[in-house]
Amino acid sequence: MSEARYLHIQAERCFRLANGPAGPRLADELEALGCAFERKARELELANRRHHAPSQIASPVAAAA
């Protein structure tokens, strides 16, 4: 399981708990934690896309062919 997927799962868990019998203060904290997990997961996914994206720079070998 990727780290981003793990963070999405943790975020979902926080959101579920926030909608449960938690008091208002705890629910707010769980919502904030869930949002932080989601934000970090998106950052990781974006970094992975950039890392795996094909390079826009032509290699010297391809240019010589």
Image (spheres, rainbow, N blue to C red):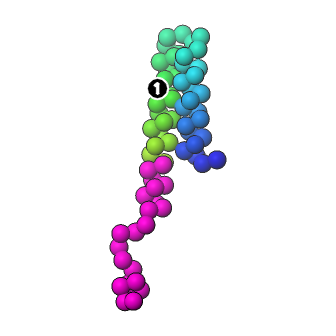
* Residue 1 in picture, x, y percent from top left: 64, 47
SS at circle 1: helix
In this orientation, which residue lies closer to the viewer: 55 or 65? 65
* Residue 44 in picture, x, y percent from top left: 48, 48
Disc 1 crowd, CA 10 A, few/some/many (<14, 14-19, 20+):
some
Q: Is residue 21 above or below residue 48?
A: above
**Which residue carries the number 1 mark?**
32
Q: In which quarter of the image is residue 54?
A: bottom left
Q: Is residue 12 above or below residue 57?
A: above
The answer to if 23 sits in the magenta stretch is no
Report the residue at 36% width, 77% height from top: 58
> Quick one: which residue is furthest to the front in this view?
65
Q: What stretch is highlighted in magenta?
A: 45-65
Q: Quadrant of residue 17?
A: top right
Q: Which amino acid does label 1 sit on?
A: Ala
Q: Main secondary structure of the magenta part?
A: helix
